[in-house]
Image (cartoon, grey):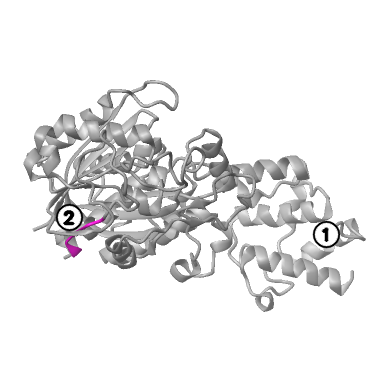
Amino acid sequence: MKDRRIVITGLGVIAPNGTGKEEYWHALKEGRSGIKRVKRFDTGQFKCKLAGEIDNFTPAKFLGQKGLRDLERTSRLLCSAAKLAIEDAGLSINHENTDDIGVCTGTTLSSLWNFAQFDKETIQEGPLFTNVALFPGTVMNAASSQVSIRFNIQGFNTTISNGYSSSIDALKYAIDFIKLRRIKAVLVGGVESLSLVNYSGFYRLGFFAGINGEELSCPFDKRRNGIILGEGAAVVIIEDEEYARSRNAKIYAEVNGIGNCFEAYKMGKYHPGANGLKESIREALRTSEIGVSDIDYISASANSVPEQDRLETMAIKSVFGRYAYNIPVSSIKSMIGETFSAGGMFQIAATIGSMYKNFIPPTINYEMNDKDCDLDYVANKSRLTRINNVLINNYGPGGSNAAFILSKWH
Amino acid sequence: MSNNYEEEIRNMVSEILEIPIDKLTPDADFFRDLNIDSLKAIEIVAAFEKKYRIIIPEQDIPKIRNLRQVVEYTAPLNKEPLS
Protein backbone atom coordinates (compact mmCIF):
# COMPACT_ATOMS: atom_id res chain seq x y z
CA MET A 1 0.00 0.00 0.00
CA LYS A 2 2.82 2.35 0.83
CA ASP A 3 3.04 4.21 -2.47
CA ARG A 4 2.22 7.46 -0.71
CA ARG A 5 2.30 8.09 3.01
CA ILE A 6 -0.71 9.87 4.38
CA VAL A 7 -0.48 11.56 7.75
CA ILE A 8 -2.70 13.24 10.32
CA THR A 9 -1.60 16.72 11.27
CA GLY A 10 -4.48 18.26 13.17
CA LEU A 11 -7.64 17.52 15.06
CA GLY A 12 -10.60 19.34 16.55
CA VAL A 13 -13.18 17.83 18.88
CA ILE A 14 -16.50 18.94 20.33
CA ALA A 15 -17.50 15.93 22.39
CA PRO A 16 -20.09 15.33 25.11
CA ASN A 17 -17.30 14.94 27.67
CA GLY A 18 -14.92 17.63 26.48
CA THR A 19 -14.35 20.51 24.09
CA GLY A 20 -11.01 20.64 22.35
CA LYS A 21 -8.49 17.82 22.16
CA GLU A 22 -6.86 18.36 25.57
CA GLU A 23 -10.13 18.43 27.49
CA TYR A 24 -11.42 15.43 25.54
CA TRP A 25 -8.26 13.39 26.09
CA HIS A 26 -8.23 14.31 29.77
CA ALA A 27 -11.85 13.21 30.21
CA LEU A 28 -11.16 9.90 28.47
CA LYS A 29 -8.08 9.28 30.57
CA GLU A 30 -10.06 9.98 33.75
CA GLY A 31 -12.93 7.79 32.55
CA ARG A 32 -15.31 10.74 32.75
CA SER A 33 -18.65 10.32 31.04
CA GLY A 34 -20.49 13.00 29.08
CA ILE A 35 -23.79 11.15 29.39
CA LYS A 36 -26.41 13.09 31.33
CA ARG A 37 -30.10 14.00 31.44
CA VAL A 38 -31.26 15.54 28.18
CA LYS A 39 -31.87 19.30 28.37
CA ARG A 40 -32.54 20.17 24.72
CA PHE A 41 -36.01 18.69 24.63
CA ASP A 42 -38.55 17.20 26.97
CA THR A 43 -38.07 13.48 27.55
CA GLY A 44 -41.16 13.29 29.74
CA GLN A 45 -42.99 10.84 27.50
CA PHE A 46 -39.99 8.51 27.12
CA LYS A 47 -38.93 5.90 29.58
CA CYS A 48 -35.36 6.99 28.80
CA LYS A 49 -33.91 10.31 29.93
CA LEU A 50 -30.21 10.29 29.06
CA ALA A 51 -27.96 11.22 26.16
CA GLY A 52 -24.41 12.30 25.42
CA GLU A 53 -25.58 15.87 24.97
CA ILE A 54 -23.26 18.83 24.53
CA ASP A 55 -24.88 21.31 26.86
CA ASN A 56 -22.23 23.98 27.27
CA PHE A 57 -21.50 24.66 23.62
CA THR A 58 -20.84 28.28 22.67
CA PRO A 59 -20.15 28.36 18.92
CA ALA A 60 -19.43 32.12 18.96
CA LYS A 61 -16.26 31.27 20.90
CA PHE A 62 -14.92 29.43 17.85
CA LEU A 63 -16.70 31.09 14.95
CA GLY A 64 -17.54 34.61 16.10
CA GLN A 65 -21.11 35.93 16.25
CA LYS A 66 -21.41 36.98 12.61
CA GLY A 67 -23.07 34.38 10.41
CA LEU A 68 -24.17 32.13 13.29
CA ARG A 69 -27.78 32.94 12.54
CA ASP A 70 -27.49 30.98 9.29
CA LEU A 71 -25.93 27.90 10.89
CA GLU A 72 -28.09 25.21 12.38
CA ARG A 73 -26.73 23.11 15.22
CA THR A 74 -25.01 20.45 13.14
CA SER A 75 -23.15 23.02 11.05
CA ARG A 76 -22.18 24.90 14.19
CA LEU A 77 -20.73 21.75 15.71
CA LEU A 78 -18.84 20.73 12.57
CA CYS A 79 -17.55 24.23 11.75
CA SER A 80 -16.33 24.65 15.34
CA ALA A 81 -14.48 21.33 15.24
CA ALA A 82 -13.06 22.24 11.82
CA LYS A 83 -11.82 25.56 13.13
CA LEU A 84 -10.02 23.79 16.00
CA ALA A 85 -8.51 21.26 13.56
CA ILE A 86 -7.27 23.95 11.15
CA GLU A 87 -5.64 25.81 14.04
CA ASP A 88 -4.16 22.63 15.45
CA ALA A 89 -2.64 21.74 12.08
CA GLY A 90 -1.31 25.27 11.58
CA LEU A 91 -2.90 25.12 8.14
CA SER A 92 -3.17 28.46 6.41
CA ILE A 93 -5.83 28.37 3.69
CA ASN A 94 -5.17 30.93 0.98
CA HIS A 95 -5.69 31.47 -2.74
CA GLU A 96 -2.57 29.42 -3.55
CA ASN A 97 -3.60 26.20 -1.81
CA THR A 98 -7.39 26.42 -1.55
CA ASP A 99 -7.96 24.18 -4.58
CA ASP A 100 -5.69 21.53 -3.04
CA ILE A 101 -7.76 21.20 0.13
CA GLY A 102 -10.96 19.17 0.37
CA VAL A 103 -13.67 18.39 2.90
CA CYS A 104 -15.20 14.98 3.51
CA THR A 105 -17.77 14.42 6.23
CA GLY A 106 -19.55 11.43 7.68
CA THR A 107 -23.06 12.19 8.86
CA THR A 108 -26.42 10.49 8.50
CA LEU A 109 -29.11 11.75 10.85
CA SER A 110 -28.05 15.32 11.36
CA SER A 111 -30.36 17.04 8.87
CA LEU A 112 -33.45 15.24 10.14
CA TRP A 113 -34.27 17.88 12.75
CA ASN A 114 -33.95 20.76 10.24
CA PHE A 115 -36.08 18.88 7.80
CA ALA A 116 -38.69 18.25 10.47
CA GLN A 117 -38.75 21.94 11.45
CA PHE A 118 -39.14 23.07 7.84
CA ASP A 119 -41.85 20.52 7.23
CA LYS A 120 -43.68 21.55 10.41
CA GLU A 121 -43.68 25.22 9.35
CA THR A 122 -44.91 24.37 5.89
CA ILE A 123 -47.88 22.61 7.40
CA GLN A 124 -48.54 25.10 10.21
CA GLU A 125 -47.92 28.38 8.35
CA GLY A 126 -48.94 27.31 4.87
CA PRO A 127 -46.68 26.54 1.93
CA LEU A 128 -46.24 30.20 0.95
CA PHE A 129 -45.06 31.31 4.37
CA THR A 130 -42.30 28.88 5.23
CA ASN A 131 -39.05 30.15 6.70
CA VAL A 132 -36.62 29.90 3.79
CA ALA A 133 -33.67 30.29 6.15
CA LEU A 134 -34.36 26.74 7.35
CA PHE A 135 -34.27 25.25 3.87
CA PRO A 136 -30.51 25.04 3.23
CA GLY A 137 -30.11 23.06 6.46
CA THR A 138 -32.53 20.37 5.37
CA VAL A 139 -30.01 18.60 3.15
CA MET A 140 -27.55 15.97 4.27
CA ASN A 141 -24.48 17.85 3.00
CA ALA A 142 -25.37 21.15 4.70
CA ALA A 143 -22.78 20.95 7.49
CA SER A 144 -19.95 19.80 5.23
CA SER A 145 -20.70 22.57 2.76
CA GLN A 146 -20.76 25.19 5.50
CA VAL A 147 -17.20 24.20 6.40
CA SER A 148 -16.05 24.90 2.84
CA ILE A 149 -17.93 28.20 2.74
CA ARG A 150 -16.72 29.44 6.10
CA PHE A 151 -13.06 28.55 5.64
CA ASN A 152 -12.98 29.28 1.91
CA ILE A 153 -11.98 25.76 0.90
CA GLN A 154 -12.33 25.28 -2.84
CA GLY A 155 -11.34 21.61 -3.25
CA PHE A 156 -13.86 18.75 -3.33
CA ASN A 157 -16.63 18.49 -0.76
CA THR A 158 -18.35 15.18 -0.12
CA THR A 159 -20.72 13.82 2.49
CA ILE A 160 -20.81 10.13 3.26
CA SER A 161 -24.07 8.98 4.81
CA ASN A 162 -23.39 5.39 5.53
CA GLY A 163 -24.71 4.97 9.04
CA TYR A 164 -22.36 3.64 11.68
CA SER A 165 -19.30 3.40 9.46
CA SER A 166 -19.62 6.85 7.86
CA SER A 167 -16.57 8.37 9.57
CA ILE A 168 -14.13 5.72 8.42
CA ASP A 169 -15.78 5.45 5.02
CA ALA A 170 -15.32 9.23 4.67
CA LEU A 171 -11.71 8.80 5.68
CA LYS A 172 -11.16 6.12 3.07
CA TYR A 173 -12.72 8.30 0.40
CA ALA A 174 -10.39 11.16 1.35
CA ILE A 175 -7.34 8.86 1.41
CA ASP A 176 -8.14 7.66 -2.10
CA PHE A 177 -8.35 11.26 -3.32
CA ILE A 178 -4.88 11.97 -1.92
CA LYS A 179 -3.47 8.75 -3.37
CA LEU A 180 -4.79 9.71 -6.78
CA ARG A 181 -2.98 13.05 -6.37
CA ARG A 182 -6.21 14.91 -6.86
CA ILE A 183 -5.89 16.73 -3.53
CA LYS A 184 -3.14 17.42 -0.99
CA ALA A 185 -5.04 17.79 2.28
CA VAL A 186 -8.54 16.94 3.46
CA LEU A 187 -10.59 17.94 6.50
CA VAL A 188 -12.25 14.65 7.36
CA GLY A 189 -15.07 15.00 9.82
CA GLY A 190 -17.87 13.18 11.54
CA VAL A 191 -20.89 14.91 13.02
CA GLU A 192 -24.31 14.11 14.45
CA SER A 193 -26.59 16.29 16.53
CA LEU A 194 -29.11 15.26 19.10
CA SER A 195 -32.74 16.03 18.39
CA LEU A 196 -36.18 14.98 19.46
CA VAL A 197 -36.83 13.19 16.16
CA ASN A 198 -33.60 11.16 16.30
CA TYR A 199 -34.26 10.32 19.93
CA SER A 200 -37.81 9.30 19.16
CA GLY A 201 -36.75 7.17 16.18
CA PHE A 202 -34.19 5.11 18.05
CA TYR A 203 -36.51 4.86 21.04
CA ARG A 204 -39.39 3.55 18.98
CA LEU A 205 -37.08 1.01 17.34
CA GLY A 206 -36.41 -0.27 20.84
CA PHE A 207 -32.72 0.45 20.43
CA PHE A 208 -32.23 2.44 23.65
CA ALA A 209 -30.77 1.31 26.93
CA GLY A 210 -33.37 1.68 29.65
CA ILE A 211 -36.31 0.23 27.75
CA ASN A 212 -35.54 -3.30 28.90
CA GLY A 213 -33.07 -2.84 31.70
CA GLU A 214 -30.86 -0.27 33.31
CA GLU A 215 -30.35 3.01 31.38
CA LEU A 216 -26.60 2.67 31.12
CA SER A 217 -23.99 2.55 28.37
CA CYS A 218 -21.97 -0.48 29.47
CA PRO A 219 -20.35 -2.13 26.45
CA PHE A 220 -19.39 -5.81 26.89
CA ASP A 221 -21.04 -5.92 30.35
CA LYS A 222 -23.70 -8.58 30.90
CA ARG A 223 -26.29 -5.89 31.81
CA ARG A 224 -26.02 -4.13 28.43
CA ASN A 225 -29.41 -3.57 26.82
CA GLY A 226 -29.07 -0.85 24.22
CA ILE A 227 -27.46 2.42 23.23
CA ILE A 228 -27.45 5.85 24.76
CA LEU A 229 -27.45 8.38 21.95
CA GLY A 230 -24.64 10.92 21.75
CA GLU A 231 -23.81 13.94 19.62
CA GLY A 232 -20.86 16.04 18.59
CA ALA A 233 -18.29 16.63 15.91
CA ALA A 234 -14.69 15.65 15.35
CA VAL A 235 -12.48 16.68 12.45
CA VAL A 236 -8.99 15.48 11.54
CA ILE A 237 -6.74 16.91 8.88
CA ILE A 238 -5.04 14.33 6.70
CA GLU A 239 -2.32 15.22 4.24
CA ASP A 240 0.09 13.82 1.81
CA GLU A 241 3.35 13.43 3.77
CA GLU A 242 5.28 15.54 1.27
CA TYR A 243 2.79 18.35 1.62
CA ALA A 244 2.88 18.17 5.42
CA ARG A 245 6.69 18.30 5.35
CA SER A 246 6.74 21.15 2.87
CA ARG A 247 4.85 23.33 5.30
CA ASN A 248 6.72 22.02 8.37
CA ALA A 249 3.57 20.62 9.97
CA LYS A 250 3.80 18.53 13.11
CA ILE A 251 2.67 15.00 12.35
CA TYR A 252 0.58 13.02 14.83
CA ALA A 253 0.10 9.73 13.12
CA GLU A 254 0.10 7.84 9.89
CA VAL A 255 -2.79 6.25 8.12
CA ASN A 256 -1.71 2.64 7.94
CA GLY A 257 -4.35 0.19 6.72
CA ILE A 258 -8.01 0.66 6.00
CA GLY A 259 -10.79 -1.64 4.89
CA ASN A 260 -14.51 -1.49 4.45
CA CYS A 261 -17.18 -3.94 3.45
CA PHE A 262 -20.90 -3.69 2.95
CA GLU A 263 -22.89 -6.80 3.70
CA ALA A 264 -26.54 -6.34 3.01
CA TYR A 265 -28.53 -8.60 5.30
CA LYS A 266 -31.86 -7.58 6.84
CA MET A 267 -33.19 -4.18 7.88
CA GLY A 268 -31.78 -3.32 11.28
CA LYS A 269 -30.47 -6.85 11.93
CA TYR A 270 -26.92 -7.92 12.59
CA HIS A 271 -25.43 -10.50 10.28
CA PRO A 272 -25.02 -13.46 12.63
CA GLY A 273 -21.53 -14.19 11.35
CA ALA A 274 -20.29 -10.57 11.44
CA ASN A 275 -18.59 -11.44 8.17
CA GLY A 276 -18.47 -7.84 6.99
CA LEU A 277 -16.62 -6.68 10.08
CA LYS A 278 -14.18 -9.61 9.88
CA GLU A 279 -13.52 -8.83 6.23
CA SER A 280 -12.99 -5.13 6.99
CA ILE A 281 -10.44 -5.92 9.72
CA ARG A 282 -8.62 -8.38 7.45
CA GLU A 283 -8.50 -5.83 4.67
CA ALA A 284 -7.20 -3.16 7.05
CA LEU A 285 -4.41 -5.54 8.12
CA ARG A 286 -3.68 -6.59 4.55
CA THR A 287 -3.30 -3.00 3.39
CA SER A 288 -1.08 -2.08 6.36
CA GLU A 289 2.60 -2.65 6.92
CA ILE A 290 2.09 -4.47 10.20
CA GLY A 291 1.05 -7.89 11.43
CA VAL A 292 -1.58 -8.92 13.97
CA SER A 293 0.93 -9.00 16.82
CA ASP A 294 1.80 -5.34 16.21
CA ILE A 295 -1.67 -4.10 17.18
CA ASP A 296 -1.36 -2.58 20.66
CA TYR A 297 -4.98 -1.68 21.21
CA ILE A 298 -8.41 -2.07 19.58
CA SER A 299 -10.84 0.84 19.76
CA ALA A 300 -14.13 -1.01 19.59
CA SER A 301 -17.40 -0.06 17.97
CA ALA A 302 -19.23 -1.82 20.83
CA ASN A 303 -22.15 0.34 21.91
CA SER A 304 -23.86 -1.66 24.66
CA VAL A 305 -26.28 -3.42 22.31
CA PRO A 306 -26.21 -7.12 23.26
CA GLU A 307 -25.65 -8.42 19.71
CA GLN A 308 -23.19 -5.74 18.65
CA ASP A 309 -20.69 -6.26 21.49
CA ARG A 310 -20.88 -10.05 21.28
CA LEU A 311 -20.38 -10.10 17.51
CA GLU A 312 -17.48 -7.64 17.62
CA THR A 313 -15.79 -9.81 20.23
CA MET A 314 -16.35 -12.84 18.01
CA ALA A 315 -14.98 -11.03 14.94
CA ILE A 316 -11.84 -9.93 16.79
CA LYS A 317 -11.25 -13.51 18.00
CA SER A 318 -11.85 -14.85 14.52
CA VAL A 319 -9.25 -12.56 12.93
CA PHE A 320 -6.65 -12.47 15.71
CA GLY A 321 -7.00 -16.05 16.95
CA ARG A 322 -5.46 -16.74 20.37
CA TYR A 323 -3.60 -13.44 20.13
CA ALA A 324 -6.93 -11.64 20.64
CA TYR A 325 -6.61 -12.27 24.38
CA ASN A 326 -3.38 -10.25 24.47
CA ILE A 327 -4.82 -7.11 22.96
CA PRO A 328 -6.58 -4.52 25.13
CA VAL A 329 -9.99 -3.62 23.71
CA SER A 330 -12.13 -0.72 24.91
CA SER A 331 -15.18 1.27 23.89
CA ILE A 332 -15.30 5.03 24.40
CA LYS A 333 -19.05 4.82 23.73
CA SER A 334 -19.34 4.01 27.42
CA MET A 335 -18.40 7.67 27.98
CA ILE A 336 -19.78 9.60 24.98
CA GLY A 337 -22.68 7.39 23.91
CA GLU A 338 -23.44 6.21 20.40
CA THR A 339 -22.65 9.16 18.16
CA PHE A 340 -23.55 7.10 15.10
CA SER A 341 -21.85 8.50 11.99
CA ALA A 342 -19.44 10.59 14.06
CA GLY A 343 -18.36 7.60 16.16
CA GLY A 344 -15.34 6.63 14.08
CA MET A 345 -13.96 10.15 14.09
CA PHE A 346 -14.30 10.35 17.89
CA GLN A 347 -12.43 7.05 18.11
CA ILE A 348 -9.64 8.40 15.90
CA ALA A 349 -9.42 11.60 17.97
CA ALA A 350 -9.28 9.50 21.16
CA THR A 351 -6.63 7.22 19.71
CA ILE A 352 -4.30 10.10 18.84
CA GLY A 353 -4.58 11.12 22.50
CA SER A 354 -3.72 7.56 23.54
CA MET A 355 -0.58 7.71 21.43
CA TYR A 356 0.61 11.03 22.80
CA LYS A 357 -0.55 10.77 26.41
CA ASN A 358 0.29 7.06 26.73
CA PHE A 359 -3.02 5.70 27.93
CA ILE A 360 -5.79 3.39 26.81
CA PRO A 361 -9.22 4.86 27.57
CA PRO A 362 -11.35 2.58 29.73
CA THR A 363 -14.67 0.89 29.08
CA ILE A 364 -16.52 2.44 32.00
CA ASN A 365 -19.59 0.95 33.73
CA TYR A 366 -18.07 -2.49 33.34
CA GLU A 367 -19.04 -4.69 36.28
CA MET A 368 -20.63 -7.98 35.22
CA ASN A 369 -18.75 -10.41 33.02
CA ASP A 370 -20.48 -12.02 30.09
CA LYS A 371 -19.10 -15.36 28.94
CA ASP A 372 -19.59 -14.32 25.30
CA CYS A 373 -17.46 -11.24 25.82
CA ASP A 374 -14.20 -12.51 27.27
CA LEU A 375 -11.45 -10.20 26.01
CA ASP A 376 -9.43 -7.62 27.94
CA TYR A 377 -11.80 -4.64 27.99
CA VAL A 378 -9.71 -2.21 30.08
CA ALA A 379 -12.49 -2.02 32.63
CA ASN A 380 -13.32 1.26 34.36
CA LYS A 381 -9.81 2.70 34.67
CA SER A 382 -7.55 3.81 31.88
CA ARG A 383 -4.33 1.88 31.43
CA LEU A 384 -1.03 3.68 31.19
CA THR A 385 1.02 2.19 28.39
CA ARG A 386 2.80 3.10 25.18
CA ILE A 387 0.80 2.66 22.01
CA ASN A 388 2.02 2.58 18.43
CA ASN A 389 -0.60 0.81 16.33
CA VAL A 390 -4.33 0.88 16.91
CA LEU A 391 -7.17 -0.90 15.15
CA ILE A 392 -10.38 1.14 15.05
CA ASN A 393 -13.61 -0.70 14.24
CA ASN A 394 -16.86 0.82 12.98
CA TYR A 395 -19.96 -1.20 12.42
CA GLY A 396 -23.61 -1.59 13.27
CA PRO A 397 -26.78 -3.35 12.24
CA GLY A 398 -27.06 -1.44 8.97
CA GLY A 399 -24.68 -3.70 7.06
CA SER A 400 -21.86 -1.18 6.68
CA ASN A 401 -18.52 -2.09 8.23
CA ALA A 402 -15.14 -0.41 8.32
CA ALA A 403 -11.80 -0.88 10.06
CA PHE A 404 -8.81 1.41 10.19
CA ILE A 405 -5.26 1.06 11.47
CA LEU A 406 -3.61 4.18 12.78
CA SER A 407 0.11 4.22 13.57
CA LYS A 408 2.06 6.69 15.66
CA TRP A 409 4.46 8.81 13.66
CA HIS A 410 8.11 8.33 14.55
CA MET B 1 -46.29 55.55 7.77
CA SER B 2 -45.79 55.33 11.50
CA ASN B 3 -42.42 55.44 13.14
CA ASN B 4 -43.29 52.29 15.00
CA TYR B 5 -43.80 50.42 11.79
CA GLU B 6 -40.51 51.69 10.37
CA GLU B 7 -38.72 50.74 13.57
CA GLU B 8 -40.22 47.28 13.49
CA ILE B 9 -39.06 46.72 9.90
CA ARG B 10 -35.64 48.05 10.73
CA ASN B 11 -35.28 45.62 13.64
CA MET B 12 -36.37 42.72 11.50
CA VAL B 13 -33.94 43.48 8.69
CA SER B 14 -31.13 44.17 11.14
CA GLU B 15 -31.67 40.79 12.75
CA ILE B 16 -31.70 38.91 9.45
CA LEU B 17 -28.64 40.69 8.07
CA GLU B 18 -26.78 40.59 11.40
CA ILE B 19 -26.03 44.27 10.96
CA PRO B 20 -26.20 46.70 13.92
CA ILE B 21 -29.30 48.90 13.77
CA ASP B 22 -27.27 52.11 13.54
CA LYS B 23 -25.56 50.91 10.37
CA LEU B 24 -28.85 50.15 8.72
CA THR B 25 -29.58 53.61 7.37
CA PRO B 26 -32.74 54.12 5.28
CA ASP B 27 -30.76 54.53 2.06
CA ALA B 28 -28.03 51.90 2.47
CA ASP B 29 -28.29 49.66 -0.60
CA PHE B 30 -28.68 46.02 0.45
CA PHE B 31 -26.50 44.69 -2.32
CA ARG B 32 -23.99 47.47 -2.97
CA ASP B 33 -23.49 48.85 0.55
CA LEU B 34 -24.44 45.99 2.82
CA ASN B 35 -23.09 43.22 0.61
CA ILE B 36 -25.95 40.76 1.15
CA ASP B 37 -26.35 37.64 -0.94
CA SER B 38 -29.43 36.48 -2.84
CA LEU B 39 -30.43 34.02 -0.11
CA LYS B 40 -30.51 36.83 2.45
CA ALA B 41 -32.63 38.91 0.07
CA ILE B 42 -35.14 36.07 -0.22
CA GLU B 43 -35.06 35.66 3.54
CA ILE B 44 -35.99 39.33 4.05
CA VAL B 45 -38.84 39.04 1.56
CA ALA B 46 -40.03 35.79 3.13
CA ALA B 47 -39.93 37.28 6.63
CA PHE B 48 -42.21 40.12 5.51
CA GLU B 49 -44.53 37.83 3.69
CA LYS B 50 -44.83 35.65 6.76
CA LYS B 51 -45.22 38.44 9.31
CA TYR B 52 -47.73 40.50 7.36
CA ARG B 53 -49.34 37.67 5.43
CA ILE B 54 -48.74 39.31 2.06
CA ILE B 55 -47.28 37.96 -1.14
CA ILE B 56 -44.75 40.25 -2.79
CA PRO B 57 -44.88 39.69 -6.56
CA GLU B 58 -41.66 38.35 -8.04
CA GLN B 59 -41.23 41.33 -10.39
CA ASP B 60 -41.35 43.80 -7.49
CA ILE B 61 -38.52 42.24 -5.50
CA PRO B 62 -35.63 43.83 -7.44
CA LYS B 63 -37.19 47.25 -6.85
CA ILE B 64 -36.75 46.96 -3.11
CA ARG B 65 -33.11 47.68 -2.49
CA ASN B 66 -32.97 49.62 0.75
CA LEU B 67 -34.83 50.05 4.00
CA ARG B 68 -36.73 53.12 2.82
CA GLN B 69 -38.04 51.24 -0.20
CA VAL B 70 -39.04 48.30 2.01
CA VAL B 71 -41.07 50.58 4.26
CA GLU B 72 -42.62 52.48 1.37
CA TYR B 73 -43.51 49.29 -0.46
CA THR B 74 -44.97 47.37 2.47
CA ALA B 75 -46.65 50.11 4.51
CA PRO B 76 -49.66 50.59 2.25
CA LEU B 77 -50.23 46.84 2.18
CA ASN B 78 -50.65 46.55 5.92
CA LYS B 79 -52.35 48.82 8.29
CA GLU B 80 -52.29 46.21 11.01
CA PRO B 81 -49.51 43.66 11.31
CA LEU B 82 -50.97 40.26 12.09
CA SER B 83 -48.54 38.99 14.68
The numbered disc on residue B73 is 1
**Residue A326 falls within the magenta-colored stretch:** no
Residue type highlighted by circle 2: Ala
Residue A345 lies, with reference to residue A276, above or below; the image says below
Front label number (2 vs 1): 2
Q: Residue furthest front?
A: A368
Please determine if labels 2 and 1 lie on a single subunit: no
Relative to A354, B62 lies left or right: right
Q: How far across and how far down the image is residue A383, in percent?
A: 19, 58
**Is there CB contact under 8 Å for labels 2 and 1?**
no
Where residue A143 sits: x, y (%)?
47, 50
Q: Which label is found at residue B23?
A: none
Q: Residue furthest right?
A: B79
Q: Report how far apart the C-alphas of labels 2 and 1 lie in the structure.
A: 60 Å
Q: Which mark is residue A253?
A: 2
| Count of numbered labels shown in the rendering | 2
Disc 1 marks a residue whose amino acid type is Tyr
Q: Position of residue A217 (x, y in %)?
A: 40, 47
Residue A287 is at least partly visible in this image: no
- A18 or A251, which lies in front? A18
- Quarter of the figure with residue A387: bottom left
In the rendered structure, the residue with mark 1 lies on which chain? B
Q: Which residues are magenta?
A: A357-361
- Label 2: few (<14), some or many (≥20) within 10 Å? many
Against A212, is A279 above or below? above
| Depth order, front residue of A366/A171 | A366
The crowd level at tag 1 (other Cα within 10 Å; few <14, some 14-19, many 20+) is: some
Residue A219 can be seen, yes or no: yes
Q: Is residue A189 left or right of residue A116?
A: left
Q: Image height check: is B31 above or below A282?
A: below
Where is the N terminus of chain B found, in terms of image quarters?
bottom right
The image shows residue A109 at horizontal and vertical percentages of: 49, 41
